[in-house]
Image (cartoon, rainbow, N blue to C red):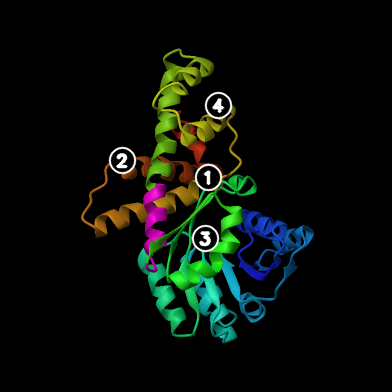
Amino acid sequence: MGEKLGMIGLGKMGIALSKEFIAEGHEMIGYDIDEGRMKMLEDLGGSRAASAKDIAEQCGITFSILLKEAHIEENTFGPNGIAKAGKQGLIHVEMSTMKPAFQAGMAKRLAAEGIVMLDAPISGSHPRVASRQISMMIGGEKAAFDRVLPILDPITSSVVLMGENGKGATMKIVTNLFVNSCTALIAEMLLTGQRAGLSNEAMMECLMASTVKGTMLENTAPRLFSRDWEARGAVEIFVKDMGLAIDLAKENGVELAVVPAAREMFKRAEAAGWGKDDATRVLEVYEGKD
């Protein structure tokens, strides 16, 4: 039997997740400031709420996936945020990618309101939601984790409890450190091969038979070859997430070298006006088109 779930933030990932929850028989109630996104949820069979507070009043489990700390703050503790619903025992699953300290602080503040929070960022872009190939890394209380696991497990390839609040966010930043930097490295590799006279087909045949073979190459190379800049993971998000990785490393006494260098290339792409495009557009920075 499905449950009544709330989704705060109906961007590409929020809509994609809502669609899968609905397919599993859950009733979805969503909120977004974009009227078009609310209509998309209704077209999927969900219903709209007037605010995050409205969602919390109706649901026992709420989800949030937003871009900026200010957006999270507003929808959590603002006049129409979930905390204002006064819903004791509410479980809030915060899926936004933010600093571990921010997530841990949010959880502590919500606990004072009788709300249990899990930080549960996602690895995998929104197209992978439909194939249920995303993974989730979660920080928070085991009891709350056990409560939401039956809801998350059917739509993911992996859900792992990493430890206390903030540890899910930590694991996401560590994961992104690799994904973001590899996107730049793959662009460098393939462009260098092209400029040296190698064909795309020959390169891929060799690379897919070598130790380079893997999900990153398989997902990234076709977009670079086709110059498909429709955003799966946007340039501006890569810039933000790589900044989080640099900060996390510094806080723990690690001086990163590769990530800052790669981030500069994505910052150039953002400065060129490509912030909303797919991060693979960094290729055009390497080509000097920025």
Measured as percent of width and height from the top left, residue 269 is found at 47, 41
Disc 2: which residue: 258
Res. 84 visible in picture: yes
| Apparent side of residue 11 relative to residue 183 in the rendered image (left or right) | right
Q: Which amino acid, by three-letter code, is at mark 4?
A: Phe
Give the residue at x 45% y 34%.
285
Disc 4: which residue: 225
Please name whichever residue, 122 or 283, is drawn nearer the observer in this view of the structure: 122
* SS under mark 4: helix
Give the residue at x 41% y 37%.
182
Can residue 177 be found in the magenta stretch?
Answer: no
Question: Which image quadrant for residue 7?
Answer: bottom right
- Give the mark nearest the N terminus, 1 or 4: 4
Image height of 86 relative to 263, above or below: below
As measured in the structure, the alpha-carbon distance from the residue carrying label 3 to the one carrying label 1 is: 18 Å
Disc 3: which residue: 67
Please name whichever residue, 71 or 152, is drawn nearer the observer in this view of the structure: 152
Which disc, if any, is residue 273?
1
Q: Which amino acid, by three-letter code, is at mark 1?
A: Gly
- Give the mark nearest the N terminus, 1 or 2: 2
Q: Is the residue under label 2 in contact with that under label 4 (CB below 8 Å)? A: no
Measured as percent of width and height from the top left, residue 55 is found at 65, 75
Between circles 1 and 4, the one closer to the viewer is: 4
Question: Which image quadrant for residue 226?
Answer: top right
Category of crowding for the residue at label 2, using alpha-carbon neighbours closer than 10 angstroms: few (below 14), some (14–19), many (at least 20)? few
Category of crowding for the residue at label 3, using alpha-carbon neighbours closer than 10 angstroms: few (below 14), some (14–19), many (at least 20)? some
